[in-house]
Image (tube, rainbow, N blue to C red):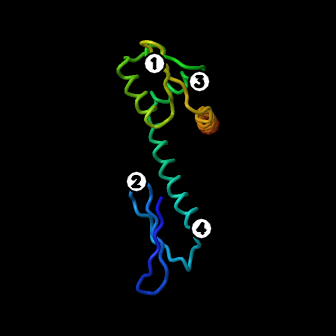
Amino acid sequence: MNIFQFQNSNASIVTEIRLAHGQIADFMPESRFNMKNQTVYIMNKKIYEMHAQICKVFTSAKRLEIINLLRDGEKTVNDLAEQAGVLQANISQHLTVLRQNNVVTTRRDGANVYYKIANPKILQACDLMREVLLEKLAENEKLAKRMS
């Protein structure tokens, strides 16, 4: 992240923050925000972008199943394909997305590549969302019983 300051036509200092990937963040007059607030603002925007990107990874039911299958430890593509009941090529495509987004890591042992969850907090996040969904299902069942 590079920070540049310049004076605009109103004679106030404006700070331009360029993120690592070249995107220019919003201009913010220094009179309204100090540098610490600007950095927090930019960091929050970046975190929201990263959060949205990682959530896209979890939009596939098959990828969620793969994550759950890896709960018990590392597995090969063949192990996962067999346990999930899908073709190896399909599992490989999903694992590529998971690996590119740092959800899983790999370890090579001879001809085999083993996959495992990169961070146990990923499992905690999945478990938490599953609890929310189970609670919602229970609420819906109660409502259906009351209406019948």
Residue 144's disc is: none
Determine whether 133 is above or below 9 in the image.
above
Say which label, 4 or 2, has the lower sequence index.
2
For the residues marked 4 and 2, what is the alpha-carbon distance in whole angstroms?
21 Å
Along the horizontal axis of the image, is 130 left or right of 92?
right
Q: Nearer the viewer, mark 3 or mark 2?
A: 2
Determine whether 91 is above or below 49 in the image.
above
Q: Which residue is mark 1?
A: 113
Callouts 3 and 2 close, C-beta under 8 Å: no
Residue 21 in the image, given as x and y percentages of width and height: 40, 53
Q: Nearer the viewer, mark 3 or mark 4?
A: 4
Residue at disc 2, secondary structure = loop
For the residues marked 4 and 1, what is the alpha-carbon distance in whole angstroms?
45 Å
Residue at disc 4, secondary structure = helix
Mark 3 closeness class: few <14, some 14–19, many ≥20 residues within 10 Å: some
Say which label, 3 or 4, has the lower sequence index.
4
Residue 118 in the image, given as x and y percentages of width and height: 55, 31
Residue projecting furthest to the bottom: 10
Callout 1 amino acid: Val
Residue 37's disc is: 4
Residue at disc 3, secondary structure = helix
Q: Which residue is mark 3?
A: 71
Say which label, 4 or 1, has the lower sequence index.
4
